[in-house]
């Protein structure tokens, strides 16, 4: 942890600003210049982040629908859109499906990604090339991977059933049209998509664990298992947490993969919140309800991020 | 540690960017197929002159992929512009999947087109949005509305006013593989019982007896509605015995193994592919598949028959309508539309699009047996004029269909859930 303080930008490296000998106007110009440098970023944030957020929040407080979206005059309804969405019969199943999807994906993405990271950290011949190949999965557009998995899980000519046949299991089950198997199927597809992301983060983190720790542990006679749990995991904790957090945020709002694979079906079995939001706004033209639902979709990862930041700050202050 | 963190931040940004791009890309790509998408807003703002004075630019949107219909439309546009040198038609392709969103966005930005080709069940939704021009007065002056089938006009009617005219019309009927039916010694079915028997008898290890679409979107409802109406039921009363019987009949074909379970993931194009490749002996589909079958399966010997009747005969109509957007170019657009609706201009459009005659006073396909069957079928076909919330209603009906077909609910339960959900949405 000592390296953190060494490279802290607020720390030793920066010289104190020169004082005296400078007129006030120069100082003013100087600070203006500094603001000038951050201005593009601030404008970007306001135009592309803040404005849509405020607009969506505002929209969610009015009963905006097809009839009054363009003409204006939508009545103010306060939080009624939120109440309506939260109490709609679609909400609880949708939230449950989203959570199952997110957690199911995350657990496997992360643990398999971790195994790959440890594997590649051994640094064997061609490991660099193989690692680059893994990234192909991650760079692939979601529409492409989703179409691929749609075909893999199809019934009569799907690859998955052909794979089962290798083990003597004869199946022509169309996995994506059975409500019991559709959700596991899209989770498996999403795990496949997400593994390289976790692998890359964890691999980068592993590079930062000092080799001396392992050497010292080896002298003390620690087993590989002990080294992993007593050195790797504690040293990697910040990376693990951020990988899980980012993974959660990304997975929680996944739309494209599911939209292409099942569009929320069969019979609503994969109807995650993001698909519900899309339908409300862009298919039913219930913009007020759609905005409220979008905000609810936003707030859950937001709370989690806040929790993470708070934990992190607390951790730093105890160090 | 620090090194890792920096790398992570970079990764995070890249992934974020990628996600955004992918989401935007997937919305365009998902259903739209590859097409030269031109974003809106590039066209010059429409001038404010009226139809008969000075130059007018009519901004036109449609979702015709390259093909016979698109070519035919271009020819008609060219002809009209040659006859009316003051009129310029600025035509833009908008992918079907993007149409709703593009219209909303350009409505918000105040840069709407003047004429839009729109899928008929979406028409009422856009009329509700208040962007379509009310054509009642113009139609009264024109006096040719009687030449159109009632069901076709109903799709463009919202709150007793007419907001558009048809560009094409279609309806569903049965396609059957002549060789397979001959082999099994079966005639095309005319009743539900015959349908069930025929579909079962035609199911072999090589092919299914029948194919329909039960996919998680409006197409599944489009294909199921005829069965609902044939039973004497309707969406207004989904808990009736008739409605339950219709769902038992429709899903029962899948229970019996005569329809593949995969139908739950087939759109109508996929159904046509199954039929073209000989994996289904019969299918329910529309005349727009005729050009497809001609190119994909030129050797396939097939026939078209009326849908089997239940308590009554019924089919469903679909098609595209022209919608004029309210604004300065209304009159010029109406002149163009009137010209396009002349029988001599409608006929080539119907032929090119594999669509049924949209006017009763024309005969685009003289002596064509297949089209003749569809035209007969059209006599008992009904529109999906269930008001502006049809998109949401259809979604609820799909859930009912899929719940029943996958065995998660009985017909009664599935339909009761749907009935409760759509009650406030029906007009």
Image: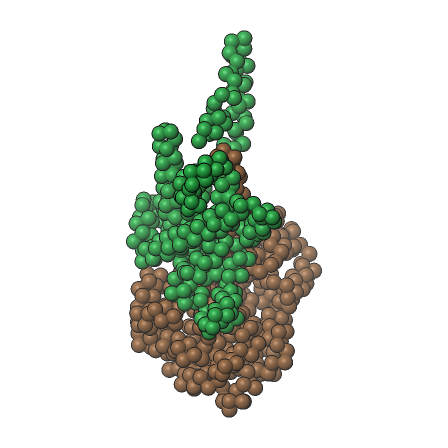
Task: Tell me what hue chain A is rendered in.
Answer: green
Q: Residue at x 42, y 42 (%)?
A: A222
Q: Position of residue B182 (x, y in %)?
A: 54, 89
Q: Is residue A193 above or below residue B155?
A: above
Classify the position of the N terminus of chain A by image quarter: top left
Q: Where is residue B273 in the image (x, y as percent from the top left)?
A: 55, 73
Classify the position of the C terminus of chain A by image quarter: top left
**Total numbered labels:** 0
Q: Is residue B113 left or right of residue A255?
A: right
Q: Is residue B310 visible?
A: yes
Q: Which residue is drawn at 40% across and 54% down?
A: A104
Q: Which residue is drawn at 42% across and 76% down?
A: B254
What is the residue that sits farthest to the top in this orientation?
A21
Task: Tell me what hue chain B is rendered in.
Answer: brown
Q: Quadrant of residue A317?
A: top left
Q: Can residue B159 be seen in this view?
A: no
């Amino acid at each position: 942890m000592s390296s953190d303080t060494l490279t802290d930008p607020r720390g030793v490296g920066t010289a104190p600003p020169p004082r005296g000998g400078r007129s006030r106007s120069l100082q003013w110009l100087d600070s203006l210049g500094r603001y000038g440098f951050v201005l593009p970023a601030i404008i970007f944030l306001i135009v592309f982040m803040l404005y849509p957020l405020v607009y969506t929040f505002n929209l969610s407080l009015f009963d905006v629908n097809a009839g009054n979206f363009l003409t204006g005059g939508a009545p103010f309804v306060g939080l009624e859109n939120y109440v309506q969405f939260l109490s709609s019969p679609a909400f609880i199943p949708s939230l449950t499906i989203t959570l199952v999807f997110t957690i199911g994906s995350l657990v496997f993405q992360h643990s398999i990604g971790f195994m790959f990271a440890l594997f590649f950290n051994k640094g064997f011949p061609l490991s660099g090339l193989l690692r680059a190949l893994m990234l192909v999965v991650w760079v692939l557009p979601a529409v492409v991977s989703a179409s691929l998995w749609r075909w893999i899980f199809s019934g009569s000519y799907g690859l998955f059933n052909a794979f089962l046949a290798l083990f003597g299991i004869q199946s022509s089950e169309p996995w994506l049209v059975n409500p019991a198997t559709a959700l596991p199927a899209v989770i498996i597809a999403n795990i496949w998509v997400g593994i390289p992301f976790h692998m890359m983060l964890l691999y980068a983190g592993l590079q930062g664990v000092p080799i001396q720790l392992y050497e010292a542990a080896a002298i003390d006679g620690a087993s590989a298992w002990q080294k992993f749990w007593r050195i790797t995991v504690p040293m990697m904790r910040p990376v693990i947490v951020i990988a899980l957090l980012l993974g959660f945020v990304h997975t929680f709002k996944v739309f494209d993969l599911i939209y292409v694979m099942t569009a929320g079906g069969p019979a609503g079995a994969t109807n995650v919140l993001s698909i519900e939001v899309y339908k409300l706004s862009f298919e039913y033209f219930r913009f007020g309800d759609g905005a409220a639902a979008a905000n609810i979709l936003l707030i859950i990862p937001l709370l989690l991020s806040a929790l993470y930041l708070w934990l992190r700050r607390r951790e730093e202050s105890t160090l | 540690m620090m090194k890792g963190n920096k790398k992570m931040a970079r990764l995070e940004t890249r992934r974020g960017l990628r996600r955004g791009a992918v989401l935007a890309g997937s919305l365009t790509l998902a259903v739209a197929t590859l097409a030269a998408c031109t974003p809106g807003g590039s066209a010059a703002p429409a001038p404010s002159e009226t139809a008969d004075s000075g130059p007018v630019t009519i901004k036109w949107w449609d979702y015709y992929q390259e093909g016979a219909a698109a070519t035919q439309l271009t020819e008609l546009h060219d002809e009209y512009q040659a006859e009316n040198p003051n009129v310029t038609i600025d035509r833009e392709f908008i992918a079907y999947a993007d149409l709703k969103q593009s219209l909303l966005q350009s409505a918000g930005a105040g840069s709407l087109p003047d004429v839009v080709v729109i899928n008929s069940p979406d028409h009422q939704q856009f009329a509700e949005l208040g962007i379509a021009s009310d054509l009642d007065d113009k139609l009264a002056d024109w006096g040719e509305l009687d030449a159109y089938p009632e069901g076709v006009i109903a799709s463009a009617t919202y709150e007793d006013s007419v907001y558009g005219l048809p560009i094409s019309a279609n309806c569903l009927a049965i396609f059957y593989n002549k060789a397979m039916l001959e082999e099994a010694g079966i005639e095309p079915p005319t009743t539900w019982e015959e349908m069930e028997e025929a579909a079962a008898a035609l199911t072999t290890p090589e092919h299914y007896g029948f194919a329909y679409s039960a996919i998680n979107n409006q197409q599944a409802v489009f294909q199921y509605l005829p069965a609902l109406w044939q039973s004497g039921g309707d969406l207004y009363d989904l808990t009736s015995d008739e409605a339950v019987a219709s769902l038992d009949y429709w899903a029962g074909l899948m229970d019996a193994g005569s329809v593949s379970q995969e139908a739950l993931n087939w759109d109508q194009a996929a159904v046509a592919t199954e039929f073209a490749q000989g994996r289904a002996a019969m299918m329910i589909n529309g005349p727009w598949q005729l050009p497809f079958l001609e190119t994909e399966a030129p050797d396939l010997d097939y026939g078209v028959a009326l849908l089997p009747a239940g308590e009554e005969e019924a089919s469903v109509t679909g098609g595209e309508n022209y919608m004029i957007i309210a604004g300065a170019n209304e009159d010029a657009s109406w002149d163009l539309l009137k010209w396009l609706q002349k029988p001599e201009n409608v006929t080539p459009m119907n032929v090119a699009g594999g669509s049924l005659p949209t006017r009763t006073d024309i005969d685009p396909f003289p002596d064509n047996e297949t089209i003749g069957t569809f035209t007969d079928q059209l006599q008992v076909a009904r529109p999906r004029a269930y008001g502006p919330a049809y998109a949401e209603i259809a979604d609820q009906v799909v859930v009912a269909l899929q719940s029943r077909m996958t065995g998660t609910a009985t017909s009664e339960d599935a339909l009761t859930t749907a009935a409760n959900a759509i009650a406030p949405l029906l007009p």
